[in-house]
Image (tube, rainbow, N blue to C red):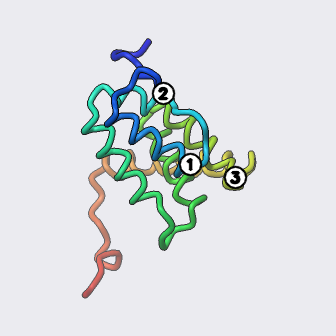
Amino acid sequence: MPLVKLIEYADSGPEVRAVYDDIMHTRGVDWINNFWKALANDPATLRRIWENVKQVMAPGALDPLVKEMIYVAVSATNNCEYCSHSHTAAARNKGMNDAMLMELMAVVGLANETNRLANGLRIPVDTEFIPKF
């Protein structure tokens, strides 16, 4: 159960409706997902997060599928069920298949395990890994 009311399009004010319209137009969809409906309780946060999403997830040096897969990896590590589902769906829409998802999760699991070992053992960083600018 959500901790805040989900603001439906029909119940939104002009500021929220403008962001919702931009989300639907940008994504080529005719609905607003629950993440945005929750954030709509604070229109300034809704707009700020949406602008950040558009900027960071826009085409750039990383392929859009890679960006979504990174998002899936971080969401799994942070134990965010909502974002794991949302960004797995987005990655699948960009071409990720089951084999890719399973390999991604294997890398996530390995990274989490080795990170905990390195942190727990306080292993010093090799000087060869440090850039020499």
The answer for how far apart the CA atoms under marks 2 and 3 are is 23 Å
Q: Is mark 3 on a helix, strand or loop?
A: loop
Identify residue for label 3: 96
Looking at the image, is 79 positioned above or below residue 59?
Answer: above
Mark 2 or 1: the one toward you: 1
Residue visible at 49% across and 36% down? Answer: 83
Q: Do the residues labelled 2 and 1 touch (CB within 8 Å)?
A: no
**Residue at x 32% of width, y 43% of height:** 47
Is 68 left or right of 130, judged from the image as shown?
right
- Give the labeled residue for mark 1: 27
Q: In this view, does 33 lie above or below 59?
A: above
What whole-number distance in Å separates the C-alpha atoms at marks 2 and 1?
A: 15 Å
Q: Nearer the viewer, mark 3 or mark 1?
A: 1
Q: Closer to the observer: label 2 or label 3?
A: 2
Q: Where does label 2 land, which residue? A: 34
Residue nearest the observer in this picture, 43 or 66 = 43
User: Where's residue 7, x and y in %?
Assistant: 40, 22
- Residue 87 percent location from the top left of the image: 55, 43
Measured as percent of width and height from the top left, residue 64 is found at 57, 61
